[in-house]
Image: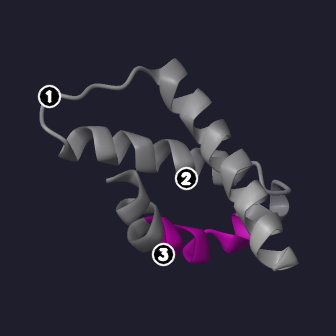
Amino acid sequence: MIGLLNATVGLLLKIVTFPISILTLGIFLLVINGLMILLASGIVPGSTCAALFRLLGAVVLALLGMVIRAIVKQS
């Protein structure tokens, strides 16, 4: 679910908030990733997500995105 949301809503949010991301040197992308995790936990019935886990999940999503982009770029 998080992948689908990140590919659709997340992409739209990243485009709209691009100027803020530039001003914060990309740190604001962690906020967007955290919002995507919160949205996914709200859509999936029975799931909850504490603030600490949203923060950790946002960091993990950002790191995985960097790794995947580096692998794809090399190919």
Residue 66: x, y in percent? 76, 57
> How dense is the environment of label 2, judged by Cα within 10 Å: few (below 14), some, or many (20 and up)?
many
Look at the magenta stretch and give its main secondary structure.
Answer: helix
Residue drawn at point x = 59 percent, y = 69 percent? 14
The quadrant of the image that shows the C terminus is: bottom right
Residue drawn at point x = 75 percent, y = 68 percent? 69
Tell me which segment is drawn in magenta. Answer: 10-20
Cβ atoms at labels 2 and 3 below 8 Å apart: no
Residue 35: x, y in percent? 45, 46
Cβ atoms at labels 1 and 3 below 8 Å apart: no
Check disc 3 and give the amino acid type: Leu
Residue holding disc 2: 32
Residue sticking out furthest to the left: 45
Quadrant of the image occupied by residue 41: top left
Residue drawn at point x = 87 percent, y = 76 percent? 74
Q: Nearer the viewer, residue 12 or 46?
A: 46
| Label 3 secondary element | helix
> How dense is the environment of label 3, judged by Cα within 10 Å: few (below 14), some, or many (20 and up)?
few
Residue 58: x, y in percent? 59, 40
| Label 1 secondary element | loop
